[in-house]
Amino acid sequence: MGQPPGPLHNKTDGGGFTQQAATLLAEATALEGSLHLPGVRDDYRSRLEHVVLLATRSLSDITDRSESSAVQGQISDRLRTNSHSYLSKRIGNMNRSDDFVADSCKVRQAPEAVGNAVEGREVALLQWVLVRAQGARAEDARYGAGQLSRGSQRAPTLADCEDGWQRVEQIVCTAEEAALETARFARALNTAKAREIAHKAEAAGKAARKIVTERNRAYTFHADPGFSFGEGWYLSAAAFFAGLFIQIRPGAVQEFQAKRFLHDAGLEGSLRPYRPRPASPKHLTHIIAEAFHADAPGAQRTLRTAFLGDESPSASLRSWIDGKVGENPEQKVLLWVRTGDHDVGRNTCFDELRQLSELVLNAGLTPIFFGDAVSADLVPTKGVDLTLCWKEPLFQGPDMRRAQLQLFEELKSSHGLVGQIGVTTAGMDGPALMGLPTLYLTQDCNVRLGRWVGAVPGYQEVVQAPGYFEIIRNTLHHWQH
C-alpha cells in the first residue's frame, strides 16, 4: 500500500507540492476497493488528509506569488510609463513612433503571460485535487460517524457512551466542513463532474448530521417472549439510577404487561415513542453497580419499593406456592435452568446441574428447579420442580413481572429460600437486586455482570474452573447458617 509522504518541508516549491498532492490522491483512490481490510481505511484517511495539506499549501504559494507579481507589475508599469515619457522627449525628431515603445513592452510582457497561463492550469489542477479529496473525506467521515455511533451504543459505561457520541459529533463536523470545501472548489471549477462530487459530499454531510440529530436515547424494554425476560429488571433499575428513557415496541406480545410494570414502578414518565435502532444495554449493569457502590442499602430499598410495591402477594399466589412447595420446613436453594438457541454456550449443563443438586442436598438444603424444562428423573425426591411455571396464567397476566418477583419474595419469607445458583441468565437479576443471595456460574469472567460483584450484596461470580465445586459447597454452608 505504501506509506504517506513525509513532512511538508520535504518539498519547498509549489509545483512539487502539486505533483505530490496529485500522486498521493491517486494512491488514496486506489485503496477505495479495499477499505474493508484491516488498517486500509486508516491509511486511506491519512493520505486524504495529506493531500488536502499539500494542495492547500501549494494554492497558498501560488496566491502569494501572484500577489507579489501584481505588486511588481504595478511598479514596472509606473517605470515603463516614466520611461516612455522620457524617451518620447529624447527622440522627438528621430522619426521613431510610439508603436516601437509599445511593441517593446509587449515583448517584455510575453513571459509573464506564459507564466500566468501555467499558473492558471496549476490552480485548476489543485482545485480539482481538492474537490476529489474533500469529497472523499466527507464520504469517509459519514461512514466513520455511523460506525462510531454504533460502537458508542455498546460502550461498557454510560460515560464511555457519551464520550463516544462527542467524538461522533466531531467527525460529523469534519464531514460538513469537507462538504463545504468541496462545494467552494467546485464553484471555482464550474464543471459538471465537480458539481456532481460536491452534491455527493453535501449529501454525505447531511447524512452524517442526521446520525446525531436522530440519536435514539431510549433503551428498549423487550416485551416479546423471544427476548430475555430478565433484561427488564436491570433496564428499569438503571432508569431509576440514571434517568434513562425507555421505549417499547408497539404490538409486542407483552407490551401491555411491560407498560403495567413500568407504571406500577413509577417509571411511566420515562417512556418515549418507539423508534428503530434502539440503544444497546451493554452499560446498564455498570450504572446499577455504581449506584450500589455509592449506597447499597439505599439502592436496594429504592428498587424493592418500586418493583414490589406496598401490596402483599395475592392469596392466589400464596395458595399456588403452597400447593407446589408444600410445608417442607427445610431451607431451599433455587437452581436455575437455561436452554434454548440463543448463545447456547451459556446454557445449563445437565451433568453439572445434577452435581449441583447433590451439593444442595448434601448441605441439608432442598433444591428448587426453576426456569426452562428438565427431565423428571433429574429432580430428586426431596426436590421441587418449578420449571416452566412462568408460563402459567398466574405469571402471564397484566402484573406478570411483579407476580414473578413476589413469588421469590414469598419463597424467602415463608418457605426458607436462602439463595439461587445458575448460569448467567438475566432471569436471576431481579431476585438478586431484591436481595436474594446469588451465585452465578460462568465459563470466563463476565465483564458486564462481574461489575455487580462487591457492589450488589450477596452477588457472587464463580468461574467454572477446577475446584469451583468447593467454592459452591462453602457458599451453601454459608447460606445455611
Image (cartoon, grey):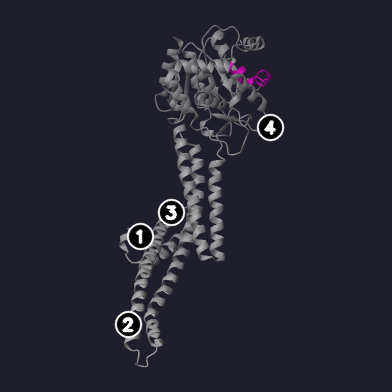
Q: Do the residues labelled 4 and 2 touch (CB within 8 Å)?
A: no
Separation (CA) of disc 2 from disc 3: 61 Å
- Badge 2 crowding class, 10 Å Cα cut-off, few under 14, some 14 to 19, many 20 or more, is few
- Residue type, mark 2 in image: Tyr
Identify which residue is drawn at 35% across, 81% down.
85
Closer mark to the observer between disc 2 and disc 3: 2
- Residue type, mark 4 in image: Gly
Q: Which region of the structure is painted magenta?
A: 392-405
Inspect this view and state whether residue 157 appears: no
Expressed as whole percent of the image width and height from the top left, the position of residue 371 reads 58, 23
Query: Left of 397 or right of it: where is 380?
Result: left
State which tag comes first along the sequence, 3 or 4.
Answer: 3
Closer mark to the observer between disc 4 and disc 2: 2
Closer mark to the observer between disc 3 and disc 4: 3
Q: Which of 75 and 472 is in front in this view?
A: 75
Say the numbered circle drawn on residue 5: 1
Expressed as whole percent of the image width and height from the top left, the position of residue 83 reads 33, 80
Q: Do the residues labelled 4 and 1 touch (CB within 8 Å)?
A: no
Image vertical order of residue 254 relative to residue 24, above or below: above
Question: In the rendered image, which residue does mark 4 sit on?
Answer: 251
- Residue type, mark 3 in image: Arg
Question: In the rendered image, which residue does mark 2 sit on?
Answer: 86
Q: Nearer the viewer, residue 64 or 245?
A: 64
Separation (CA) of disc 4 from disc 1: 57 Å
Image vertical order of residue 78 relative to residue 225, above or below: below
